[in-house]
Image (cartoon, helix red, strand yellow):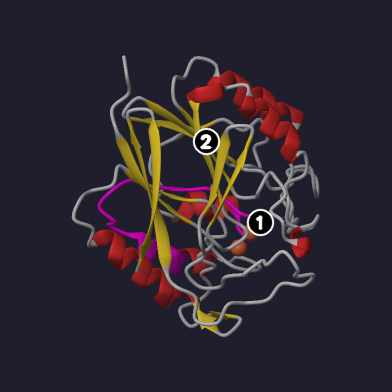
Amino acid sequence: MAAEPVRFIHITDTHIGGRDYELFGVATAPRTERLLATIRSLPFEPDFVIHTGDVATDTPQRQHYEVAARLFRDLGCPVHFLPGNHDDAQLMRELLPAAESVSIDPNPALWSFRFETNGHLFVALDARDGDADQGVPDEDIRGRVSDEQLEVLRASFDTADSVTLFVHFPPLDLDSPWHRPAMILRRGRELHAELEILGPRLRAVFFGHVHRSMQVVRSGVLYSAGASPCVQFPAAPVEEEPTYQPEPTVSFSLVSYVDDQVVIKQYRA
Ligand SMILES: [Fe+2]
Ligand SMILES: [Fe+2]
């Protein structure tokens, strides 16, 4: 039986600190508030919101997630949070209003999970470096995928007709010199190989970490990055060092699966 349509919002890299925290001169909480106000005022109810990581900022603290929890409260639809390299998964699980999901990661320090909506399978892969510091993720900014995680993914994908993957780190090269190799997922090509064999059963892969919206297609697999509402990197093909876009647009992606199509629309907040 064909799955029903599903519509969800992809947001990422909110980097929330304290109430007055600024990242490169940009106050992150008010921008996230603006983003969420626009989502609340949409003329329809999304099936869920997915945040693909860096909910909090450098050295995440309890107070950062308390601020985030207040901002995300009563969004009107389920919200899923995937940890990024700046996050503390334990604090996230304790404090954020996360929707129900099934934990699947073989490493208890990581928070990979799966859930189903309208007959579609969604899998979120926590690709922070789970082997660093005796099982506790460090501030590794590339992340990696373990053999055990690849096995779990394979098993999860096995019988699903419609598969979507969320991962914080970009698995493939993005034509941006400063991203190489510091930002690109270790063993990303191995992850891609697992996804490629799913063929049309795989809808798309959504990622964050690069802070700007972009799309990549490799051998039929669509990868889509969401923009950070606060700090965006242009990532031009000639940049050896990151630069910051002044006054970046606050935006999010609305993703619709209707019949066999994936439609991604960027909304300005
Ligand atoms: Fe980030
Ligand atoms: Fe990140």
Residue 145 visible (yes or no)? no
Residue type (three-letter) at the residue carrying disc 2: Phe
Residue 240, horizontal then vertical, whole percent: 79, 70
The dot on residue 85 is 1
Residue range highlighted in magenta:
66-88
In this rendering, the answer to whether 98 lies above or below 266 is above
Q: Is residue 189 left or right of residue 105?
A: right
Q: Nearer the viewer, residue 65 or 232?
A: 232
Residue 106 position (above or below residue 63): above
In the image, residue 8 above or below residue 118: below
Q: Is residue 169 found left or right of 213 in the rendered image?
A: right
**Quadrant housing the C terminus:** bottom left
**Residue at (60, 50) in percent of width and height:** 168
Position in image of residue 189 (x %, y %): 74, 36
Residue 41 can be seen, yes or no = yes
> Which of the 4 quarters of the picture holds residue 212?
bottom right
Between discs 1 and 2, the one toward the N terminus: 1
- Badge 2 crowding class, 10 Å Cα cut-off, few under 14, some 14 to 19, many 20 or more, is many
Is residue 70 found inside the magenta-colored segment of the image? yes
